[in-house]
Image: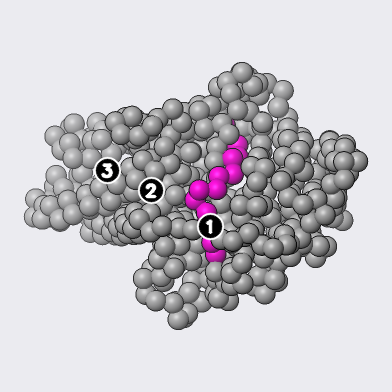
Amino acid sequence: MEYIVVTGYLLALTYICAFSLGQLHLTYLYLKGKKIPTHPPLLPEEWPVVTVQLPVYNEKYVVERLIDCVASFDYPTDKLEIQVLDDSTDETTELIAERIKYWQARGVEIHLVRRPDRKGFKAGALQYGLERAKGQFIAIFDADFLPQKGFLKSTIPYFNNENTGVVQTRWGHINETFSLFTRLQAFGLNAHFSIEQSGRSQAGSFINFNGTAGVWRKHCIVDAGGWSDDTLTEDLDLSYRAQFRGWHFEYLEKVVSPAELPVLMSSIKSQQYRWNKGAAETARKNIKKLWRSSLPLTNKLHAFFHLFNSSIFLAVLLSALFSIPMLFVKAGNPTLNFLFDLGTVFLAGFFAIGFFYWVAVKNTLAPGFSGGWQSMGYYVRYFPLFLTVSMGLSLHNTIAVLEGLAGIRTPFIRTPKFNVSNKKDSLRKNIYVKNNLTMSTVTEGLLGLYFLFGVAAGFYLKDYGLLLFHLMLSGGFMTVFYQSIRKVNYAAG
């Protein structure tokens, strides 16, 4: 049993370390790429026809502002088509119809597209709209996005390269300063949209369309086999299928498309579940094709950690669960001390991931901070909190990963949008607010107590090496548990 504990613990740490070193390499590539001057492409002599797709399902609080934003694009009116792909079952459809009537009267070609059923969820809606789209290029925005007026003129010129299949922009955050949890989400997302996307792009490795705030060449979608609903991350799946076909993806870090971050733990969990399970499903679907491809080894490794990105939560949870028995194994087996001494090597992984997030903070600049010591203060404040809450979500996300790897199918559960950007906005009457007590939530509370026991065990055994780790784990799980059951009867914030 002791060797099972030690082996499991070391294997989990090895994966975490390898993943972290991969992130460090992406950081190096990102910094290297920033030194290379870039030049904007030439504007086309004639702007092509673009179809903007807005997939919507019960979004009564945000759909009007989305339509108004997209209908106001700075783009030739005769070259712009807007499809509102509406699967709603509430009054959202009526709100859409009113805004469509308003903009049609002003010369905008905008249509309400309703399907007979919601088969295939978002992927099904996008495919249904694609088959009816007039545009040579397809721009997609989720309901909570507010793209800049010049979005299309900033992205379409990059399709001058006939091999470019996708142009993806960076997500911004409408409500980043709303609460601690929106700040922490922004902290993590900024790292993905600065370092990961840019670093992979710099290396010539696969990147992904992020489901929204990007533009596809219609022929690329068709050539790759169209949208598929056999994973919860139809965007990642189609991205890999397209790049296996040789299509190039362009990433524009400097073009920012603002969106609303989830403000409740239930919404955060819903989004995290879909992203992590979908990534695991996509990995399961594409991993064999990846290793059999003619891609260089470095690109295969980047793609491997990209596809199995969500599995880091499984490794974190396993290392955490084994860490408390490890304290007792260490105390009772002095002959194994050399293994624990070797464990210090894994500190390299921690410093690697710390540097990864520091570079992301420095280059995305948090609101109200101008760089230097101010950015460092922001990093020191939020990096430990980000790690703590991420640890607290590891059980929830591990369940999603295991279901995805096992091929267990579940419906696409959307992340509800609330149209909250400051603390004066209220959630009291929001019909999409739901907190459900589940077995996994109860387990999160129990894990909080388990790791509190780990803190006590450390003091009892006079082994303080994992004390901070167990404090962060206990705090993370307790926080996620409390926020998951907290009754929302307050003004937002």
Which label number is shown at residue 324? 3
In percent of the image, x 18 and y 32: which residue is there?
Answer: 460
Left or right placement of residue 306 versus residue 273 in this view = left
- Closer mark to the observer between disc 1 and disc 2: 1
Above or below: residue 41 compared with residue 100 = below
Q: Which of the two labelled residues, at mark 3 and mark 2, occupies the earlier sequence position?
A: 2
Q: Determine whether, in the image, residue 147 is placed left or right of residue 102.
A: left
Callouts 1 and 2 close, C-beta under 8 Å? no
**Where 275 falls versus 250 (above or below)?**
above
Q: Where is residue 337 in the image (x, y as percent from the top left)?
A: 11, 52
The three-letter code of the residue at mark 2 reads Leu
Residue range corresponding to the magenta coloring:
249-264
Foreground label between 3 and 1: 1
Which residue is at the far front?
A: 45
Quarter holding the N terminus? bottom left
Few, some or many C-alpha atoms within 10 Å of disc 1 (few <14, some 14-19, many ≥20)?
A: few
Picture residue at 73% right of the left edge, 50% below the top: 75
Callout 3 crowding tier (Cα within 10 Å): few <14, some 14–19, many ≥20: many
Of discs 3 and 2, which sits in the foreground?
Answer: 2
Quadrant that contains the C terminus: top right
Decide whether residue 360 is among the magenta residues.
no
Dominant secondary structure of the magenta stretch? strand
At numbered mark 1, what does the secondary structure look like: helix, strand or loop? loop
- Residue picked out by circle 2: 317
Residue type indicated by callout 3: Ile
Mark with earlier residue (3, 1) = 1
Residue 315 percent across, percent down from the top left = 37, 54
Asked if residue 251 is among those painted magenta in the image, a careful observer would answer yes
Residue 293 appears in view: yes
Secondary structure under tag 3 reads helix
Residue 40, numbered circle? 1
* Amino acid type, mark 1: Pro
